[in-house]
Image (tube, grey):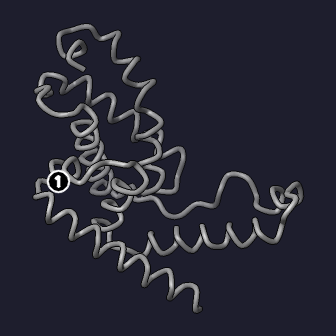
């Protein structure tokens, strides 16, 4: 990123190759919409290029990038482009026909769907913290920088979010 900041714009393609997939995963876990997630990834890299002069280089690039991604997502929500849950791209029936252990796979799919549904039922701030920590693998101190909070506060919020996720999952399981 330092090279991009210094004017070597061709290095941005290397950053895109390294991080676009992780950004896509971040957005997809929050929106469940592949096309919208891809658009958001493109917007993040446009902003990385546009605001490259703000990168200080004293922290990790990924922390700065996810901070920018978070802002892009907030802007998209403000514009009213909130996406709703979309079904998986390939029908589960087709996948089951080729599976050697259909019953176990169906049970796993049902649990994954319940986890997604439980995650979607959480408030946006809790959902985002869980996606950043559990799906994107960011450290607590990195998330704390992004959300402008302390590491201890982030740990507590994530713990509470996991507790709420578990309660939502159990409620869905008992329906």
The residue positioned 45% from the left and 82% from the top of the image is 168
Residue 127 rendering spot, x and y as whole percentages: 36, 65
Residue 98 rendering spot, x and y as whole percentages: 88, 54
Mark 1 lies on residue? 144
Viewer-proximal residue, 150 or 6?
150
Q: How many marks?
A: 1
Residue 62 rendering spot, x and y as whole percentages: 28, 36
Residue 45 in which image quadrant? top left
Residue 147 rendering spot, x and y as whole percentages: 17, 54
Where, quadrant-wise, is the N terminus in this rendering? top left
Where, quadrant-wise, is the C terminus in this rendering? bottom right
Q: Residues within 10 Å of mark 1 (few under 14, many from 20)?
A: some
Q: Is residue 46 left or right of residue 168?
A: left
The residue positioned 53% from the left and 71% from the top of the image is 115
Above or below: residue 84 compared with residue 16: below
Q: Is residue 97 left or right of residue 43?
A: right
Callout 1: SS: helix
Residue pushed farthest bottom?
174
Above or below: residue 38 compared with residue 6: below
The residue positioned 40% from the left and 57% from the top of the image is 134
Residue 88 in which image quadrant? bottom right
Above or below: residue 50 compared with residue 64: above
The residue positioned 36% from the left and 62% from the top of the image is 130
Q: Is residue 2 left or right of residue 127?
A: left
């Amino acid at each position: 990123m330092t090279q991009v900041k210094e004017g070597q714009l061709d290095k941005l393609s290397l950053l895109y190759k390294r991080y676009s997939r992780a950004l896509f995963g971040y957005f997809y876990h929050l929106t469940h919409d592949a096309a919208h997630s891809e658009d958001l990834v493109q917007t993040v890299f446009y902003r990385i290029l546009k605001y490259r002069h703000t990168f200080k280089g004293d922290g990790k690039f990924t922390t700065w990038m996810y901070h920018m991604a978070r802002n892009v997502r907030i802007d998209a929500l403000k514009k009213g482009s909130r996406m709703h849950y979309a079904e998986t791209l390939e029908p589960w029936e087709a996948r089951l026909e080729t599976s050697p252990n259909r019953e176990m796979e169906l049970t796993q799919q049902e649990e994954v769907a319940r986890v997604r549904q439980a995650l979607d039922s959480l408030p946006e701030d809790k959902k985002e913290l869980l996606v950043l920590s559990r799906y994107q693998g960011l450290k607590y101190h990195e998330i704390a920088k992004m959300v402008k909070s302390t590491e201890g506060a982030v740990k507590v919020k994530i713990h509470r979010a996991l507790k709420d996720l578990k309660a939502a999952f159990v409620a869905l399981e008992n329906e």
